Amino acid sequence: MALGDGDDGAAAAAVPLISDRPKHAAIVRSGTEWTAAAHVITAVIGSGVLSLAWSVAQLGWLAGPGMMLVFAAVTALQSALFADCYRSPDPEVGPHRNRTYANAVERNLGSSSAWVCLLLQQTALFGYGIAYTITASISCSMIAHYSG
């Protein structure tokens, strides 16, 4: 069954995801396709591209590109799942808008799963901060050591 092929008629009466009439008058969305593309490019060119050469050097010419394809597939699947969870229970005309990842997890899996999700998310962010700090300090000390 494709999206919008509901047999009860309720989906046709609901407001679609892209509509001419404003649902929330207080929210002004000023983003365009260009700003969305800029955010995607910024996220992609982040630490992933900067560490790509080192990763391929460590894994080799067979496993390096293979793992890049695996991570690309995981990222595509994760993006599709996030896009489907933006509106609940139906991704096109769902009446509930999930503004955060934890909100989507709580609505679909329950409050205890949302708590675990938030704990893991904050732990990962803390770990990323520590890893970037250590990596930056090692890089700066190497630059200072070899420059003079």
Image (tube, grey):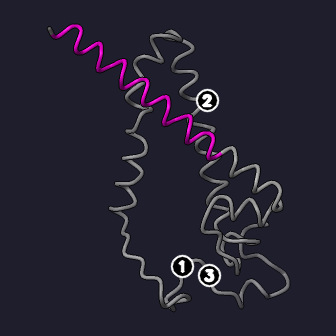
Q: State which quadrant residue 45 falls in.
A: top left
Amino acid carrying label 2: it is Val
Number of other residues with Cα within 10 Å of mark 3, as a class: few under 14, some 14 to 19, many 20 or more: some
Q: Please state which of residues 37 and 42 is positioned toward the viewer in this rendering.
A: 42
Residue at the disc numbered 2: 70
Give the Cα separation between the discs numbered 2 and 1: 32 Å
Number of other residues with Cα within 10 Å of mark 2, as a class: few under 14, some 14 to 19, many 20 or more: few
Q: What range of the chain is rendered magenta?
A: 121-147
Residue 125, numbered label: none
Q: Could you tell me residue 57's position as x and y percent?
A: 45, 11
Give the Cα separation between the discs numbered 3 and 1: 5 Å
User: Per the image, is 74 magenta?
Assistant: no
User: Per the image, is 137 magenta?
Assistant: yes
Give the Cα separation between the discs numbered 3 and 2: 34 Å
Residue that lies at the very extreme toward the left in this rendered image: 148
Q: Could you tell me residue 48's position as x and y percent?
A: 45, 32
Residue at the disc numbered 1: 18
Q: Are marks 3 and 1 in contact (CB under 8 Å)?
A: yes
Q: Could you tell me residue 40's position as x and y percent?
A: 42, 51
Residue at left 72%, top 50%? 117
Residue at the disc numbered 3: 16
Residue at left 24%, top 9%? 145
Q: Please state which of residues 59 and 66 is positioned toward the viewer in this rendering.
A: 59
Q: Earlier in the sequence, mark 3 or mark 2?
A: 3
